Amino acid sequence: MNKQQTRIIVIMLAIALALAAFVMLRDRAQPAGDEHDEHAEQGEHAEEKEGAHADDGVIHFTPNQITVAGITVATAGPKHLDTFIRMPGQIALNEDRTAHVTPRAAGSVRDVSADLGQQVRKDQVLASIASADIAGQRGALTAAQKRVDYARRIVATERTLWEEKITARQDLLKAEQELVEAEVARDTVRQQLQALGAAGGGGSNLLAIRAPFDGIIVEKHITLGEVVGADTRVFTLTDLSTVWADVVVPARDLDIVRVGTSAVIRSIASDTTAPGKVSFVSSLVGEASRSAKARVVLANPGAAWRPGLAVNVDIVTGSSDVPVAVAREAIQTVDTRQVVYKRVKEGFIAQPVSTGRADGRFIEITAGLNPGDTYAASGSFTIKAEQGKGEASHEH
């Protein structure tokens, strides 16, 4: 091989090495560039997505999500609001419709037909006792009736004798007077038996203890076979169709709380509420508590208000009509601002609002909402939590 051939071979090898190096460098650079382009494209899409969420301010909720989350949508509009002062209270028995049932005669218990907690009707027999006093009174009634019958026969005889002019009219008048006295004596014994609740019954010594009105047995102190006195409290019966809400009124509020003032009773144990009116305000102020006692008569259908239950009593101090109001639970605080989550097509937006007067259920909106706007009432805290998640994700 001469020098010319050797030179050609070296040149060709150099060219081949240069081409190989160029190809390797190109292959290495191409994936990195593509990956960079792909990441850049994904970043642009993410920024576009985040930017769209941030720009429109919508917290996205589908109708199904709203239902599952338990969110209630309501409509803002005019309301009648009552302003009030709140005072502590307690449900108590209506003492005007509570009776402490006694036998009214001493005796031994023969039967008990009423149980604690039982609903009873007026004149229903609750128990019966065997009473010597009743036996004596019924015996006296029988004797008095026989004296009346005898006096009637004497009157009939004296009238016949007088008509036949055998006796004087004075004898007839005397017989008629004795009949009247016998009838009076009989009626007196009968009335005594009626007062004991033992009218009728022939010569029996049994005394039936009856319910004085419709109600429920809340106390029972009688058992079969025991001996009870005439004034023994054997049952306590109450009519729970109405109850009292006893209210503690500070002395400074006595000028506000007056008989006839409207009130709203609110259970501490639940969301139950009921309207009522103040029926009594004590004239005395406690020396230690510096407060007086007031009372609200409360209708109690279904016996939902149980005596002993602690309540809040809102005494109404004024009332007004407002053009726009929302449920109190709709108001949320976001970044020190009060907002209401207004319903839009895609979900909700946090609408800043200004508030005014309020009662226990609604609050006036003075700016931020118009009548007819729909908003999230109950469950609005769920939307607030979802909004917080979205803002945290955006910052990240």
Image (tube, rainbow, N blue to C red):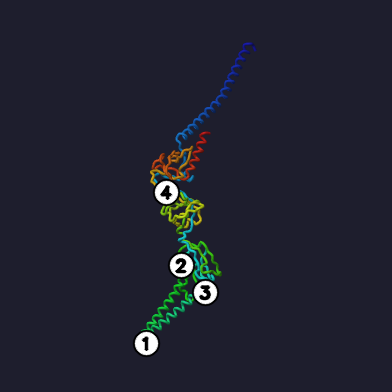
Q: Mark 4 points at which residue?
A: 317
Alpha carbon separation for disc pair 2 and 4: 44 Å
SS class of the residue under badge 3? helix
Residue 33 image point, x, y percent:
54, 26
The answer to whether the residues at label 1 and label 2 have Cβ atoms under 8 Å apart is no
Alpha carbon separation for disc pair 4 and 3: 60 Å
Query: Amino acid type of disc 3?
Result: Ala
Q: Which mark is residue 123?
A: 2
Lower sequence index among marks 2 and 3: 2
Q: Which of marks 2 and 4 is in front?
A: 4
Query: Amino acid type of disc 2?
Result: Asp
Alpha carbon separation for disc pair 1 and 2: 52 Å
Lower sequence index among marks 3 and 1: 3
Within-10-Å neighbours for mark 4: few <14, some 14–19, many 20+: some
Q: Where is the N terminus found, in terms of image quarters? A: top right
Query: Amino acid type of disc 1?
Result: Thr
Q: Residue 167 carries which label?
A: 1
Residue positioned 56% across, 24% down in the render: 29
Q: Name the residue under label 3.
A: 132
Lower sequence index among marks 1 and 2: 2
Alpha carbon separation for disc pair 2 and 3: 23 Å
Query: Amino acid type of disc 4?
Result: Thr
Nearest the camera: 249 or 266?
249
The residue most toward the bottom is 166
SS class of the residue under badge 2? loop
Nearest the camera: 282 or 362?
282
